[in-house]
Each structure stands twice: as structure tokens, then as C-alpha cells.
Image (cartoon, grey):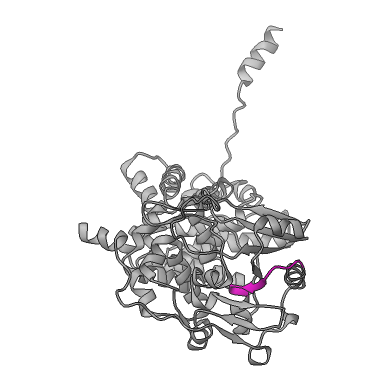
Amino acid sequence: MIKIWKRLFSREPQAEAVARPERVVIPRDQHTISRARISPHAVKVLYRLNEAGYEAYLVGGGVRDLLLGREPKDFDVATSASPEQVRRVFRNCRLIGRRFRLAHVHFGAEIIEVATFRAGHQPVEDTEDEPALDGAGEVGEHGMILRDNVYGTLEEDAWRRDFTVNALYYTVADFSVVDYTGGMADLDRGQLRLIGDPWQRYREDPVRMLRAVRFAAKLGFRIEPGTEQPLFELGELLEHVPSARLFEEVLKLFLAGYGVQTFELLRHYDLFRYLFPATDAALAVEEEHYPRTFVVNALSNTDERVAAGKPVTPAFLFAALLWEPVRQLAAELEASGECKTWLQALQVAGDAVITQQAVRVAVPRRFSLPMREIWEMQARLTRRSGKRPMQLLAHARFRAAYDFLLLRQASGEALDELCQWWTDYQASQEVDGEAPPPRPPADSEEADGEGRRRRRRRRGGRRRRGGAAAA
């Protein structure tokens, strides 16, 4: 165990220093980036900062995707101006963040993110002429960067970025691309390579491991061997990342349209268990491959919706990812007699699993409540007598619960009859809003007593009648 911890937190950089590639400038006629494919607002920010006397470059995923012929999701700008100086240039600017100070320039619904050039975290001492910036850069006990506001030059900014393909800079000064780290060569090779010593860079920010997996799945790139090896050994570092930050990373991992590939890579590198420990434990003891099949089917469904431009919700995603531990715990509670009904068991199990999950990945209440409703309606959908179907059909979470039921059926659960019943019932309501629901089959629990109706006794009726008589 001591050896593992030394490897995690005390590993020294490679003895042989790797020579840094020379700075390369790719002129306009040797790359495929055109201003016509860049957001006009991002172009405006670049020009305004240049006119104010600052360096400004388009950087990150926007440049990478433009060079690959993809449609960028957003456009980020790196500049020599400090966040306060950016705010003075743009009145429509807001400064955000403490760990990583940023300027957000607002153009209606579009936000252009502007970051000041960052430098490394070398120790800084106070001098008479230049006092150290208190709290500008802060590193925690495990080597994780807690605050990253040490400003530097363009070259320093390039070398402190995560992956070489994300460290390419486009300027409107002469429309060239500047490359300090060999990113263009890695882009041509289809290779994802971390800048600097991977062991140290992952310790500085363990989320980089998740970013490596996400970019590999999204771009279809292979991870360079030196960048890949630590992924198998440094997963424990994710336990020190705040759960709220991991929630945002999980959304990026699984709601970008590459959820299935991302899930397979996370499992391959044994990182999935640090995000969803209960689900990973359920996957480890698969019963007829159902748990894994259900998760893959849910992610595949999400990927298809993203590709079709349809809305997706984190509530449904998390409900699917946590369903197997909820289902198993509910079955145990019902079998042991601790819960009298499956509905009650699902309620208790859902609360327990969400509480446990929040330790690793926080789930905001606005998503955890719909998750609970989706799970609980799996029990309610089995109750089809009387007016219950009409009431369930009007429930705000019915459609999500019905889709969830279909996913369970497609993954191997014996729910063919129940799914068909609800499909037919919805069709009957679309044709005729007054059409009666199909009767449950004769061998179902709901068939007993379906033909006879019992009068419901009014609460307090006897007292009111007695009072009336007395009057």
C-alpha cells in the first residue's frame, strides 16, 4: 500500500528531460480556419482586445474542431489582458470564478469566455519591489491545484494547458495558427497527448483523466501511451475532487452524444467506479448481462436524441445510471419484509442510493426529485385498475417513466405485456379521450375484484350525520 501511495503522490518526473518542440507559426494559406466559420461575437472580442493594445487568440476546442472540419460548440479567447482589464474594454462583461478567474463577455444568449494567459506554479517570494500575489496560485496536499490565477505569457500559457491539440492559438492579427507544443502533428496523427509529465499533470487536476477519456471518445483519437498509463493507476485521485464539480463533468461525459463510447472507456480504465461506485458494484455481478445492457441502452438512447437535436435531461440519465443499485436494494427490502410493497421499497432504496451517490457526484435537488418520481412510477405503472391509468397519464413524469419502462423491457426484463398495454392505452386516448382503458389480463393481480366497485366511505361522514341529527 505504501508503494502505491508513493507512486500516486511522490512520483518524480522522468530523469531524461524531453526536448520541447520549437514554436511553429502556420500561415493562413496552410490551414483551414476561416473567419466565416467563427462566431462573429468571438471575432469582435479578438479585434477589440487587439485594438486596446492586448494580445488575443482564439484557443482550445474551437481551434481544434475548426482544424478538424467540425462545428465548434463554443469559442474561447486567451489574452494578455487581466480579467479587470477585459472588463474595462467590454461593458457587457462579468468576472466569474475564484479557483480560475475568468471574464465572460455577454452577447445576448451567447457568452465568449476570455481567460488571461496563465503561467506555472513556481514558488514566488516577496521582494521589496514586487510582493507575491497572495492566493494567486494554490496547491493542495495531494498536488491538486486549488487556485490557478498565476498570470504569464503566451508561451507559458501554451505549456500549462492540458492536451497538445487544445494548445493551438489562432490570431486575427495575421490569421495564423501558433503552435508551441506539437499540437498540429498530434492532430494529424489522431493522437491525444498530455503536455508535460502526465503523472504530475493528473495530480494537479485529476479531472484531466476524465477529459482524456471524453476527448478520446468524442474525437475518435487514441491516447498516447505515456498519457494513457497513469489512467489505470491514478483513479483514486478523483475522490479528492469536489462532488459538485464532478456533476458538471459527468454531464459533459454522457450528454455530448458519445455516451456509449465514453462509458466503455471509463470502464476500461477503471474510472467509472470512482463516479458511480454503487452502479459499478452492480455491474461487477451481472445477472444475464442485464445491468450493463440497460446502462448501454440508456446511453445509446441519449446519444440518438443528441444526434437528432432532441432535448435530454440529466434527471433521466442519472435515473438510468443508478437504476440497478436502486432495483437491487428495493428487491432486498421487499424480500426481507422491511417494506410491504415494491413502491415503498423503491422509495426507500431511491433515497438511500441518492444519498450515497452524492458523496462522489452531487445530484442537485432539481434533478433528484424527478429521478425519484421516475423510479416510483415503475411500480405505479403496474397498477392499471379504475381511474389510475388516466391519473398516471396526466402525471408530469409519465412520458419519462414510460420511456424508462420500455428501456427495461428492451434490456431483458419480462415486461412485454405491461409495455404493450400502456402503448395501446395511450393510442386509445389519442383517438378518443373518453375511451375506457383496456382491462388488465385475467391472470393479473388487478383482475381480482375489477368487476365490482366498492363505495368509498367519506371521512367524518358519521360525525356530520350525527351532528345533523342532533340539530
Quarter of the rendering containing residue 469? top right
Q: Residue 157's spot in the image, x, y percent?
A: 54, 69
Say if residue 290 shows up in the picture: yes
Residue at x-position 61% and y-position 70%: 306
Quarter of the rendering containing residue 80? bottom right
Q: Residue 371's spot in the image, x, y percent?
A: 53, 51
Is 98 colored magenta in this rendering?
no
Residue at x-position 31% and y-position 59%: 9
Residue situated in front as seen by the camera: 246 or 356: 246
Quarter of the rendering containing residue 435? bottom right
- Seen in the picture, residue 70 relative to 119 is either above or below; the reply is below
Residue situated in front as seen by the camera: 438 or 266: 266
Figure label count? 0
Q: Residue 57's spot in the image, x, y percent?
A: 65, 73
Residue at x-position 31% and y-position 78%: 16
Q: Is residue 143 left or right of residue 185?
A: left
Range shown magenta: 52-62
Q: Which residue is farthest front?
A: 128
Residue situated in front as seen by the camera: 98 or 242: 98
- Seen in the picture, residue 79 relative to 144 is either above or below; the reply is below
Q: Which residue is farthest bottom?
A: 29
Looking at the rendering, in which quadrant would you find the C terminus? Answer: top right
- Seen in the picture, residue 84 relative to 112 is either above or below; the reply is above
Looking at the rendering, in which quadrant would you find the N terminus? Answer: bottom left
Q: Is residue 209 left or right of residue 74?
A: left
- Seen in the picture, residue 158 relative to 434 is either above or below; the reply is below
